Image: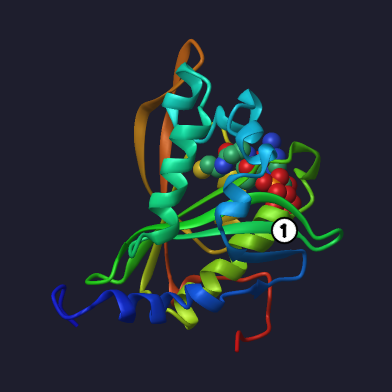
């Protein structure tokens, strides 16, 4: 596989984006669409300081995100051949609660970077992020045949660091005092995982 002979149709097929539904124990992941983009709660999450303070998107901290900016960001992701952008639903009541992304997919090196936001703060601490990340990683390794997944987190985000550790990601590097946090700076921690290292919370094989 070279960079030049992988076309858009092949990427769509490999991502399975047009028909993708990932059913986990606590969450369901489906392609993020204009319906999620235009749901007022999505914009409200991106304006909630407690949600965005560890997201690594300083532009949203400096100035409240506008619908126009967010819509354009989402539209780029929805159609991107190098990003798989999904909406997260809580299985208990089928509510849209956040987003998850396999970003910067490199089809040549077979790598991607995982990011997540549980925007509904009332759902934090229930294992939903761990559940969603686990099923997405399983899908990326088993169905999409990616070889290596990476992720990054601010060191003041213990929940995120704990999730990657539990799922078998290895801490691979630290950028010292890379991220600004309020009136101080904190480290940025990089994680990486190969298929044989993943410890998914779901033991069933994906179809
Ligand atoms: C970080 C975030 C994704 C966590 O989501 P969540 O659904 O609350 O996380 P979960 O409940 O699945 O898992 C939390 C894990 O972290 C652990 N944890 C939570 N707070 C912790 C703390 N202060 N210290 C250590 N571990 C902690 C929990 O014990 C749990 O681990 P366990 O299942 O082994 O017990 C969510 O808070 C969020 O979206 N925050 C805003 C955006 C963000 O920071 N995204 C990540 C950017 S890299």
Q: Does the image show residue 173?
A: yes
Q: Looking at the rendering, in which quadrant would you find the C terminus? A: bottom right
Name the residue at 56% across, 46% down. Answer: 161
Q: Looking at the rendering, in which quadrant would you find the N terminus? A: bottom left
Q: Does the image show residue 158?
A: no
Q: Quadrant of ligand 1?
A: top right
Depth check, front residue: 107 or 54 = 107
Answer with left or right where residue 152 lies relative to residue 138: left
In this rendering, the answer to whether 157 lies above or below 20 is above
Q: Residue furthest right?
A: 92
Depth check, front residue: 172 or 46 = 46
Residue 165 is situated, as x and y percent measured from the top left of the image, at: 56, 55
Give the quadrant of residue 13: bottom left
Label 1 Cα crowd, 10 Å radius (few <14 / some 14-19 / many 20+): many
Residue 191 is situated, as x and y percent measured from the top left of the image, at: 43, 52
In this rendering, the answer to whether 30 lies above or below 20 is above
Give the quadrant of residue 188: top left
Instruction: Check disc 1 and report its element: helix, strand or loop.
Output: strand
In this rendering, the answer to whether 117 lies above or below 1 is above
In this rendering, the answer to whether 82 lies above or below 187 is below
Report the coloring of the rendering.
Answer: rainbow
Name the residue at 74% across, 54% down. Answer: 127
Residue 183 is situated, as x and y percent measured from the top left of the image, at: 48, 10
Q: Residue furthest bottom?
A: 207
Answer with left or right where residue 50 lies relative to residue 127: left
Name the residue at 56% across, 53% down. Answer: 34
Residue 114 is situated, as x and y percent measured from the top left of the image, at: 46, 56
Q: Residue furthest top?
A: 183
Instruction: Name the residue beneath numbered marker 1.
Output: 89
Name the residue at 42% across, 79% down. Answer: 144
């Amino acid at each position: 596989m070279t960079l030049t002979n992988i076309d858009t149709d092949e990427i769509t097929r490999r991502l399975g984006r047009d028909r993708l539904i990932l059913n986990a124990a606590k969450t369901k992941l489906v392609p993020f669409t204009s319906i999620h983009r235009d749901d007022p709660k999505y914009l409200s999450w991106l304006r909630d300081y407690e949600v965005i303070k560890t997201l690594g998107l300083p532009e949203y901290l400096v100035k409240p995100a506008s619908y126009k900016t967010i819509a354009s960001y989402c539209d780029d992701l929805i159609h991107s051949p190098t990003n798989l952008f999904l909406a997260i639903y809580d299985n208990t009541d089928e509510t849209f609660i956040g987003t998850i992304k396999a970003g910067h997919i490199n089809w040549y090196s077979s790598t991607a970077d995982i990011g997540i936001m549980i925007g509904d703060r009332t759902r934090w601490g229930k294992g939903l992020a761990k559940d969603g990340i686990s099923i997405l990683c399983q899908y990326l390794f088993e169905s999409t045949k990616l070889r290596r997944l990476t992720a990054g987190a601010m060191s003041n985000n213990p929940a995120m660091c704990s999730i990657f550790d539990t799922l078998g990601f290895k801490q691979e590097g630290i950028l010292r005092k890379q991220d600004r946090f309020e009136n101080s700076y904190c480290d940025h921690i990089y994680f990486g995982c190969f298929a044989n290292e993943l410890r998914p919370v779901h033991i069933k094989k994906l179809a």
